[in-house]
Image (spheres, rainbow, N blue to C red):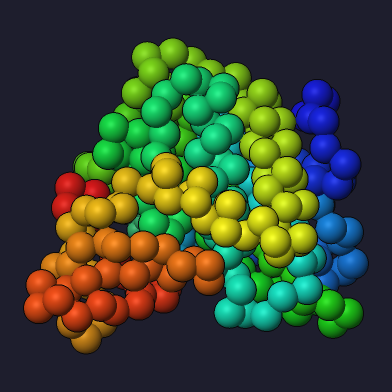
Amino acid sequence: IKQSNTLCLGKEIAYYEEIDSTNTRLKAWAKEGAMEGSIVIAEEQLQGKGRLGRIWDSPKETGIWMSILVKPQIGIEKIPQITLLAGLATCEAIRKTTGLEAMIKWPNDIVVNNKKVCGILCELVNTGKDTAVIIGIGINVNSKKFPDDLPYATSLYLEGKEVYMREPIISCLLEQLEGYYIQYKKQLSLHNIIEQYKDKCINMNREVNIVSSTESYRATVKDIDVEGRLIVQKQNGIEETILAGEVSVRGL
Ligand code: BT5
């Protein structure tokens, strides 16, 4: 990744042909003292991770499977904000480099034409010295097809009918993310970032299924607050604040 104009992100890069998970690798490296902005990237993941123990399909050379280390010195309750930043930066980078109308599905998916093209998994790691966040980003770039059990998955290639170089997308993503991250650390810009996120979020003012381990109901998305939580209104008019719950949108 030669042409990335960043000050911090991507200055140290560990590249693998094959790895279990870039998040897992970067977690270990963080404990060994990796500096902020360090990146792990792989051509193929054998055990790519989604949220809640789910699997992220990461076949060889078709995607961007990457993890980025940041050290914002925040508590676990602030991780959703980092997920938002990463989602916004990735959405912008996909738009800028492909021209596709990428949208964000709260909290951590990027969709194109209502299908999932990217997933983001942020994890907190205690390095012994400080607390760091691993931002794991998986983008399906040139995948030509997906297994039958992933009917809502798509790639930039399938949506744009074009083969895309991965390097410019990565460079653009790092630049976008660094820009938002610098803003984020100033805290004052948080409202501005949330507004930009909401502009690109497909769930805004739409009906969603809220599915948790104990209940399931339909509600309308009203807002996203500065903590990155979803504010929904149930059919009986009562508002609920949703944290890292499971929100499924029809057709996704
Ligand atoms: C996510 O989880 O969407 C987060 C995915 C993060 C992957 C990156 S790749 C680099 C880094 N290293 C890792 O090990 N992970 C990160 P979640 O919202 O739980 O969605 C997972 C679900 O998406 C799965 O249960 C499948 O239904 C679906 N899925 C799996 N692989 C997919 C793919 N390649 N494209 C689209 N959907 C997929």
Q: Is residue 234 above or below residue 195?
A: below
Q: Is residue 82 visible?
A: yes
Q: Is residue 47 visible?
A: no
Q: Residue at x 52, y 55 (%)?
A: 194
Q: Nearer the viewer, residue 217 or 170?
A: 217
What x and y, as percent, mark residue 143? Answer: 42, 29
Number of residue marks: 0
Question: On the image, which quarter does residue 224 sit in?
Answer: bottom left
- Percent position (x, y) of residue 66? 64, 46
Decide if residue 113 is on the left or right side of residue 82: left
Residue 45's x, y, as percent? 56, 48
Depicted 18 relative to depicted 165: above or below = below
Which residue is at a point 39% across and 18% down the rendered structure image? Answer: 160
Query: Depth check: 206 or 252 in front?
Result: 206
Which residue appears farthest toward the bottom when viewing the image?
Answer: 214
Is 170 in front, or is 225? 225
* Location of residue 29 (image quadrant): bottom right
- Residue 75 coordinates in the image, percent (x, y): 67, 80
* Residue beneath the point at 88% across and 59% down: 35
